[in-house]
Image: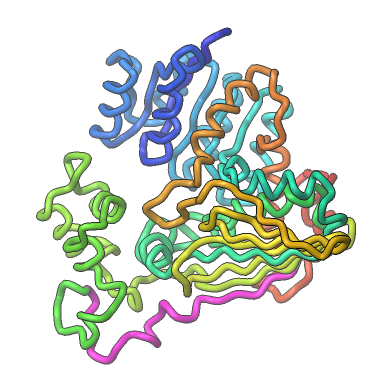
Amino acid sequence: MKQCTAILIGAGMRGRIYTNEMFKFPDQFKIIGVAEPIESRRNYIKEKHGIADDMCFNSWDEILDKPKMADLAIICTMDDLHYAPAMKAIELGYDILLEKPVAPTEQECADISLAAEKNNVKVLVCHVLRYTPFFKTIKEIVMSGKIGEIMSVLHVEAVGNVHQSHSYVRGNWHSEEETTPMLLAKCCHDLDILQWILDEPCEKIQSFGKLTYFTEKYAPAGAPERCIDGGCPIEETCPYNCRKLYYESDDNAWFRPSCARGITKGEVPTDEEVMTALKTTDFGLCVYKAHNNVVDHQTVNMQFKSGANVTLSMNAFNEGGRYIRIFGTKGELMATMKNDSIDLYTFEDKKHTTISTVPTEESILGGHGGGDAKMITELYDYISGDYKGYCAADINISVKNHLIGFAAEKSRREDTVENIDKYFATYGIKND
């Protein structure tokens, strides 16, 4: 068995999770280089994997200016910094593990797919939900034919009110201009899962959605710009009070480091550093005055080649989680990702069958229900050419599913029904 050597570009949470999983399989993976501007993150990877000083870099361009030094490049930078390192890594001949979304624009997504094909390199996109016991079981039920041909699907991405406020109102993904639209930032997982389950091309798409609630219109009279300024009339009851979420809460393993990123000098920020963040960054802003512009609710209607109709609903006004209902010619499937079972009703015998799976933690503080770890265990076979599974999201199919999301955004903005064949052709991609 040949050991796969890898470099990590972007040592934030996602990069750390993937390389920590690789660390468990020393016969298969070895991290030999890291590029990360934040010293504490860079040093964590260096010490964890025993990386030499001269293989630690401050930026992606520094590490990719060197001749190819490993088999695999793991790209986990922010969304708007995927394109350039991915294209350079492809040029150098690296196989790539690429964090989603692929890139923030349609053309950049297409460019990466076409370049990978031209240079004969493998690019695996981190659609980790494919690997969860929950969605794998649903995929296997559909593949078995137990529910027959799929006629309709209802799928809900319940973002969660606090997750929305943290990531898409105050956080890194609050602005479409700075990152990507909500469908790509949050729902590219869901668009990918839906196409993967149906396993056929999408032909038409239509979408509706708006930013409605997290706006100045809903700010309480007299509310300050920042929660910590005091004087807010709903300070004690507001679920988005930044002092409670980021400073006072005991359940803040995610919130504190996230809000103090770029301020803290260590991995665990001090109270003083958190308070500085709340006084100076968007994480301290009132959620109704946070300069955000991404939607807080959206619906996407899709028609697939077989005639199946699929509705994806994304909204912030819930506790969080995903659930799905699939209507087939032989039966019906209903499942909620937080539960440990899937309900299958078959028409022939008029019986409900409960199919157990593994409970999936879907809160902002949770992982991806085991999907991260399972993806890494399959990654080695994928890049070595021995892959026989059905979960891997190669760059070609991932980009098509991303373009479906961009087409939905075009529909939402322009009030159109988009023809996917024509939309793909604009970017040199075939819808097959």
- In magenta stretch: residue 218: yes
Q: Is residue 422 visible?
A: no
Q: Residue at x 37, y 34 (%)?
A: 11
What is the chief secondary structure element of the magenta stretch? loop
- In magenta stretch: residue 176: no
In the picture as drawn, the residue positioned furthest to the bottom comes out as 221
Over which residues does the magenta segment extend?
Answer: 206-226
Q: Position of residue 98 (x, y in %)?
A: 55, 36
Q: Is residue 123 left or right of residue 223?
A: right
Q: Is residue 431 above or below residue 350?
A: above
In the picture as drawn, the residue positioned furthest to the left comes out as 272
Q: Is residue 295 above or below residue 6?
A: below
Q: Is residue 216 above or below residue 145?
A: below
Along the line of sight, the residue nearer the viewer: 253 or 268:
253
Along the line of sight, the residue nearer the viewer: 263 or 321:
321
In the rendered image, which quarter is residue 172 located in?
bottom left
Q: Is residue 85 visible?
A: yes
Q: Position of residue 303 (x, y in %)?
A: 82, 63
Q: Residue at x 42, y 40 (%)?
A: 14
Q: Residue at x 50, y 76 (%)?
A: 211
How many discs mark residues in the rendered view?
A: 0
In the rendered image, which quarter is residue 120 located in?
top right
Q: Is residue 347 left or right of residue 73?
A: right
Q: Position of residue 43 (x, y in %)?
A: 26, 27
In the rendered image, which quarter is residue 267 located in?
top left
Q: Is residue 335 left or right of residue 100?
A: right
Q: Is residue 386 left or right of residue 430?
A: left
Q: Position of residue 404 (x, y in %)?
A: 71, 56
Q: Quadrant of the N terminus?
A: top right
Q: Quadrant of the C terminus?
A: top right
Q: Is residue 306 above or below residue 315?
A: above
Q: Residue at x 38, y 34 (%)?
A: 16
